[in-house]
Amino acid sequence: MPTPSPSPPSSPGSTPTSLRAAFYLLTSVPLGSVTLVALLLLAGAGSALAVLVIGVPLLLTLVLSGIPLAALERRRLRLIDPVPLADPHREPPAPGLASWLRTRLQERCTWRELAYALLFAFVLWPLEALAVGTVLLVCGGLIGTPVMMAVGGDGEARVLKLWLADSWPEAFAVLVAGVVLLPMLTWPLRFVARGRAVLTRALLSPPEAALDSRIAELDRSRTRLVDAFEAERRRIERDLHDGAQQRLVALSMTLGLARLEKPAEPLAGLLERAHEEASAALVEIRELIHGIHPHVLTDRGLVAAVEDLADRSPIPVDVRLTVPDRLLEAVETAVYFAVSEALTNVAKHSGATRVTVTGEAAHGRLAVAVAVEDDGRGGAVADPGAGAAPDASGGTGLQGVADRLSVLGGALLMSSPPGGPTVFRLEVPCPPADSRT
């Protein structure tokens, strides 16, 4: 299933606005000072009380102190970098504080965040305070010269402790100079903030190994969902086969025996209609069971199941499907229902007189390609002649097939130019079925 592509990361050359950069650097000062005090208190108290039990939680809190700081830094980073920074922490395998602590202490990103907290507390925020403070001190000292002259009352003011302004025209000239210098001095802050953002992203980004493990876990969970769905469908099939179908068989036999007793004519007619209804219901429930999961697919494999579809198709179907071995049950089921849906659509809408089903397991790629072609009228997709994913607006059948294949990592494409032929082409990975579930 196609997923929206993430926003491209901002290029290293892009810079935030001067105001946002100054605000980002300015907010580092109180946050960094609080972080420094908290780390010093935790380290001091934890070391002093290490011989007592109370010191252990303090030292443990010190180790985990980078986690809330990193979470706040990821949010603060959005001030100057629009690309969100993902949380690298994984969910604990079990609820409870012990499971959470064990998971966090085993993660590499927890220790990276602690290192970031130490770097931020002792190095980064003092440098940022120096950069922002220099701009504020220089520009503020120049702009505030008339105020200092008025407050002093002696008609003079010392500008940045460098020279003495002793007249009002000179004081206002210094003020204008400060206003002019303000944007010029804040402009370099944009590059300082950008460099700070690059460093933050490098230290707090999820490592590649963590991303790979998350992807692998998503694949495993997706496989478990497919297996659970198939197991539930098989359970429904067994319940229908062993429950409702057997009751209908018993009812049909009972009605048949009642008809043999030659009852009165009105009752005989009612028994005959009831017997016909029971027989029709039995046929429908057998077709329903077959549609849930055909026994031929379970017993003899994909090729035999597709050939059975071809025998039951109202349009003559040529099957040239080569699958050397049994595949995973989920793969066989997905391909079978994809071919079934394609043949149903061809029979209903194409006006074709002949259909061909071809496919083979590609060597080395572990993929299956099945094409359903017809000589009918075509025009089943909006983009003539080009392979396209089925449009959900055209019905839920093909979209459901595409969704089923996408769960397995496959895809369904359809081409249908006006005049035909219509081609349904599906590809799905098929790892060898060492153990069929």
Image (spheres, rainbow, N blue to C red):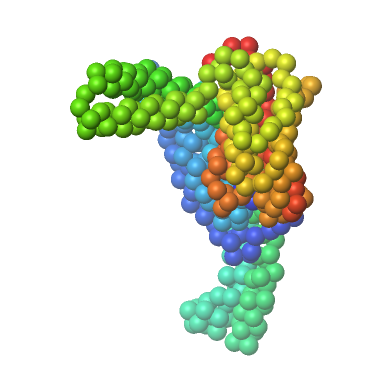
Quarter location, residue 122: top right
Residue 182 drawn at (x, y percent): 64, 71
302 left or right of 153? right
- Looking at the rendered structure, the number of numbered marks drawn on it comes to 0
Is residue 225 something one can see in this rendering?
Answer: no
Is residue 350 something one can see in this rendering?
Answer: yes
Q: Which residue is drawn at 72% across and 37% down?
A: 354
Q: Which residue is drawn at 61% across and 15% down?
A: 300
Q: Residue at x 42, y 30 (%)?
A: 284
Residue 141 drawn at (x, y percent): 59, 70
Q: In this view, does 417 lie above or below 211?
A: below
Residue, far right: 363
Q: Which of 155 and 278 is in front in this view?
A: 278
Q: In which quarter of the image is the N terminus?
A: top right
Residue 424 drawn at (x, y percent): 69, 40
Q: Nearer the viewer, residue 414 or 201?
A: 414
Q: Residue at x 49, y 36 (%)?
A: 67
Q: Which of 416 and 366 is in front in this view?
A: 416
Q: Which of 406 and 250 is in front in this view?
A: 250
Residue, far top: 434
Residue 181 drawn at (x, y percent): 68, 72
Quarter location, residue 177: bottom right
Q: In this view, does 150 lie above or below 111?
A: below
Residue, far bottom: 169
Quarter location, residue 368: top right
49 left or right of 173? left
